[in-house]
Amino acid sequence: MSSTIDRREFLTRAGLTLAIAATPSGMKVFAMGQANTESELFQPTVWYTLSPDNQLTVIVNKVEMGQGTHTAHPMIVAEELDVKWEQVRIEQAPTRKEYYDPPRYTRQGTGGSSGVRGMYEHLRKAGAAGREMLAQAAANRWNVPVSQCRTSEGKVYHQASGRSLSYGELVEEASQLPVPENPRLKDKSEFKIMRTPIARLDIPAKVSGEAKFGIDTFVPGMLYGSIARPPAFGSKVDSYHEPGAKAIPGVRYVVRIDRGVAVVADTLDAAWKGREALNVKWSQGNVPSQSTETVDRGLVASLNKPGLSAHNEGDTEGALQNAHKRVRAEYHLPYLSHAPMEPMNCTAHVQPDRCDIWVSTQMQSRSLDAAVKITGLQPEQIYVHAAYLGCGLGRRARTEFVEEAVHLSKATGTPVKVIWTREEDIQHDLYRPGNSSRITAALDEEGRVTAWSHKVVANMFSVRPGSEIDSQAVSGLTRFQYSIPNMSVNWVKAENPIPCTFWRSVGSSHNGFTVESFMDELAHAAGKDPLEFRLQHLKENKRLHGVLELVADKAGWGKSLVGAEGRGIAGYYSYRSYVAQVAEVSVDRRSGKVKIHRVVCAIDCGPYVNPDTIEAQMLGAITMGISAAFKEKVRFADGGVKSANFFDYHLLRMSESFPVEVHIVDSDDAIGGCGEPGLPPAAPAVANAIFNATGARIRRLPMTPERVLEALKRV
């Protein structure tokens, strides 16, 4: 991948350049020069250039964090444009409004599993328009009907005469033609690039070490910033010893900022030593006595508080009172850290007339907006250089690490690089909320669910305008995947100062576990097979019904196990995709250790681009889901975070990995996402498999050996 180009340089390139723009009548394609990129009416979101030397350059407005977007976008354009894959190159789009995400046009960023699904239709239309324009240009030159021309691998052919012209020979003429508003999109039977496994374009540079992540940024004259941060939530600086820090060789500046006290030095080591020499004294936090135990007790106790109604359909209370059988269970999930491979970092250089930011970020436009606020510069004076991300998971959608670097550069007048340590990354994260849920359901005489009452306790961090309800706390519950006539959902805000944000699959990461674990409990209470029980409640959800049937078939559901003791199944709808998984496990009754023998996964994400990427995303999401299920929990003490590094915030190890089989549904339904939907079913599939093997229910995560042994004692 080449470096980011300036917008002016891009717009003045020769060749055929197309833009996608949103208009009051829908999406339209424009040749460069026809689209007014500065007006409010047309705001192009993606561009590509076909040059006279037959080079297709796709400008990608999303960032690459391992999810494969930088390969999928050019695959879509190259397919519809009809060029050879070898002709393709990519460039990262600059951070400007014309590259903001459709259909919202309010930001430029990568998240919510929208990297491909959000651009799929628009990129296809742009590629198809270019293909038709090139064919028309050739037809005009040959003076033949365009219906007699066909395109293939970067050329236009006239079948009757055997003549051909390369796209490069036609770009000048094609760029003068009117742009078809509704070009014909290829049928999937015509695809040569899409739906085939293609190696990601970012992999060679990452293997060779040439790839540049945010942490790899080096700018002439750059200094390093390190920040003394509060040890507890809400702690404030009482005092610090500035002379002590400045006595450290290499320390240049001490700067007070909102989040603490910063030391800026010639080297990172000097900055760290200067930070320690500050000897900062802090006030007590908001809740000095807060600990892991008090946090856990608070979540459980809040289940007895009245909640805000997020959804109410039918007569849930009446149906529960008249139930043939009532089933009730509580589930508890811990706070989780993102713990990305690349810790938070940013390099900024604030000058009187411009500000440059080099950062691994999921939200370029938020970084730009933050810099505008701090520097007072205009948006067009801010240049966000988006680098590769060493993992995002929602953490890099926030901007406090960007703000720190910009503040320090502005204060010192020099380029400043801020790198968080692993301890800072875990102890000052914005966490996946802890969660407690209480569910009560009614079964009729035939074993059907007639009512479902669901109360959720979780922190507030994502409230939509006009609502008091945290949308992520009740994600997947207000538009329930099962057909149940009477349903109520209530949310209780967790009253603690723990800061939270998006974590891979967000609310679905906990609601997927509680819903699919409870469905298994209901199946057992009804005396029915867990697969059969789910399917009978999915008459109106054909796609989830389909993936459950597919995964069951591929996993040999109902057949004898080989090696493993138990199977569990789970399915969940999130980010417009449908994923089902079957896990096979065995349990050591003496140690409580669980071995996963394999996980079989089926996904229906609608039309797909690169099956290799989908398989990789499922494998990664399942592994992360299992890591959280067995290992991860943020621990608190003295009003702050006790967990500090991987010695006490444990992740799944390579020696604990397991085979994963992925099956992709050939679907023509609406396109869905792939980065996150593979995670929600993973933990419940394993927990349900443990029950199938031992009769022990696991309702609290993580499923440590000690917790498994406790559950076994209750059987």
Image (cartoon, rainbow, N blue to C red):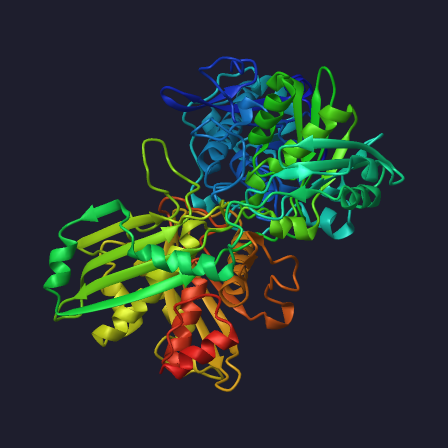
Q: Quadrant of residue 256?
A: top right
Instruction: Answer left or right for 6 relative to 546.
Output: right
Q: Residue furthest bottom?
A: 590
Instruction: Answer left or right for 394 relative to 229.
Output: left
Residue placed most toward the observer, 570 or 41: 570
Instruction: Give the x, y percent position of residue 269.
Output: 83, 45
Answer yes or no: is residue 159 visible. Answer: no
Give the quadrant of the C terminus.
bottom left
Q: Which residue corresponds to the image point at 35% horizontal and 58% vertical from the top-left?
A: 301
Residue placed most toward the observer, 152 or 703: 703
Give the quadrant of the N terminus.
top right
Q: Quadrant of residue 443?
A: bottom left
60, above or below 235, in the image: above
Q: Which residue corresponds to the image point at 63% horizontal and 32% vertical from the top-left?
A: 403
376, above or below 536, in the image: above
Instruction: Answer left or right for 272 relative to 432.
Output: right
